[in-house]
Image (cartoon, coloured by chain):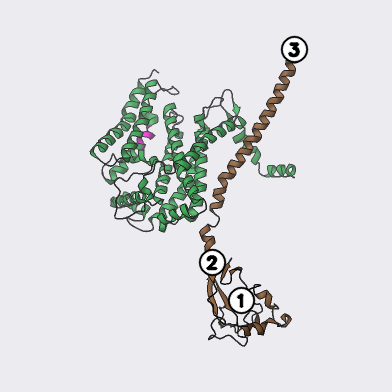
Amino acid sequence: MAEQTKPWIESRLPVGATLQTHIAGRMMPRDLPYAATLGVLILGAVAFLTLSGLVLSVYYDPWHAFDSVQFITREVNYGWLIKGFHATGTTMLFATVYLVFFRALLSREYKAPGDLVWFLKILLLLTLLLVGWLGYTLADGAESYWSLHNAALTASRLDGLPGAIGDWFFGGPETASTLERMAVLHAALAFLVFLVVAIHYAAKRAIARQPARPVALHPYYTAQYFVAFCVFALIFAVLVFFAPHLGQNPLNLAAPSGLVVPDAVSPPWYLLPEAGLANAGGGALGHVLAFIAAFAVLAALPWLDRSAPGSLPSGRARFLTYLLALDLIALCLTETAIPSALSSILAAIFTGWYFLHFLVLTPLVTASEPK
Amino acid sequence: MAELAKVEQEIEVAVDVVKRDFLKILTIAGGAVAAGAIAWPFIDALNPSAESLALARPIVEVGGIAPNSALRIVWLGLPIYIRKLTDKQIADNQFLIPASLPDSADYNSRVKPGYETFVVVVGLNTGVPCELLGNDPSEARGPYDGWSCPCDGSVYDPLGRVRIGPAKKNLAIPKFTFLSDSQIQFG
């Protein structure tokens, strides 16, 4: 039966041949490090989040958001686990994406001809941040509620076009249907993530050099992916079962109240760096402009980096990249602190360092490298 | 000497192949178990929860129903009539010849053994789907002291068997069990 069916399908729809040419038989360089598996892990995490999100969306009710999350946790079979999968999956996804960015900075992947791939990476991060924030508002805890409320209120206070866009996005400063919109956008944009991942993959393949001593992807790299996946799954399982609320403000587990404002409205950990950078600007428009500026310097990196094409980063450049990572972690920590004079000074220093790194230190250090 | 080394090498290769096959089977088996363990929560999450199953299988107290009257409950969106028969209603219907009825059914097929005084039916006319009258003795019950339909005039006996058309079928009997003399559970 199978011997007859296979050629019957294959002659009409060449699935096997396509998989063989484009995936299994793809020629890869011999010595890719384990860090190169992060892309596959991102795709896996996004697929996993989509699956668990589909199950959650069956029971989620934006009109009684907090109660429906409680219902999922307490009544739905394995609802607590699916919710944990979704929350921890987000943590794992962002951890992987931030690692990919760190690796790209260290290895200078963003230099031409990798600049388009770099821009697509930034687009992917922006999409994920939006989807992540929308998902965070859907939890409708005390923190989520105020995050959404502040955002909608801020948007409606803006004048002109930004205000009009904000009102269109949120449906006005205070409407009951806002969470319904957030739920629809969260799901719709999640599917957009797949598209961005696919385009990024195509762009990356287009500039890949023909390896000198190639090996086929299967079984050499499928074995490597399998090991990487096992380690990923192990970390994931430990986090799901032992730290299901990792990086979340514990107040978000309390029901929201329109009359009780939390001491500090801090987003989950994966939004903290961007929140910290956005807070550098004063006022509603200032936050937006600071956020845009933070991503503009990232996007300008192919030009800010003055090093010769194909040159490996010097020790100083690598040190600065590590320092930047520490700087962003420190910025996250100050973001979670209860606002005080000290925390605002520290936040200003850490934000300043971020812009200093890209606008001053990177051009200086890379220009001084031997050409 | 050289031959011995060659034989040793061949054995080593054979052992390696056996080892590799074993590891392959072990990995696939472990992977299948892991995939199943991950898939099951996703599948089971879409199964009805214990709460909704409990709501779908309600327990009803029937001990307080007076003879010659019926309790009306709604189960799965259908009106369910639970009727306690009088001795006269039992005597009138017990020895009827089933073949003489429009939809032949004997007494025992309409009640549960051991609880022959209770009739549990879906209270919807089987012709035009109207809710039947006759739960209370003051309502129009028709000539057989059962139920009557206010819409097309069909008449049923106390066991829910159709006696006068236009309806052609007896009243449906829902799925239920007696937990005790005074409790029944639906579903």
Question: What residue is at 39 percent from the left and 58 percent from the top?
Answer: A177
Comparing B69 with B139, the one in front is B69
Q: Of marks 2 and 3, which one's residue comes earlier in the chain?
A: 3
Percent position of residue A263, x then y: 29, 46
Quarter of the rendering containing residue A347: top left
Comparing B147 with B177, the one in front is B177
The secondary structure type at the circle numbered 2 is loop
Categorize mark 3 by other alpha carbons within 10 Å: few (<14), some (14-19), many (20+).
few
Quarter of the rendering containing residue B1: top right
Type of the residue with mark 1:
Val
Residue A198 in view (yes/no): no
Question: What residue is at 43 percent from the left and 46 percent from the top?
Answer: A131
Q: Determine the residue located farthest toward the left in the rendered image.
A: A341
User: The N terminus of chain A lies in which quarter of the figure?
Assistant: top right
Q: Which mark is residue B2?
A: 3
Q: Is residue B125 left or right of residue A300?
A: right
Identify whether A223 is placed above or below B69: above
The secondary structure type at the circle numbered 3 is helix
Alpha carbons under labels 2 and 3: distance apart: 84 Å
Q: Which mark is residue B154?
A: none
Viewer-side label of 1, 3:
1
- The span shown in magenta is A295-300
Q: Of marks 1 and 3, which one's residue comes earlier in the chain?
A: 3
The secondary structure type at the circle numbered 1 is strand
Colour of chain A in the image: green
Label 2: which residue?
B58
Identify whether B27 is placed above or below B87: above
Percent position of residue B143, x then y: 62, 88
Q: Which chain is assigned brown?
A: B
Identify whether A367 is placed above or below A258: above
Label 1: which residue?
B119
Type of the residue with mark 2:
Pro
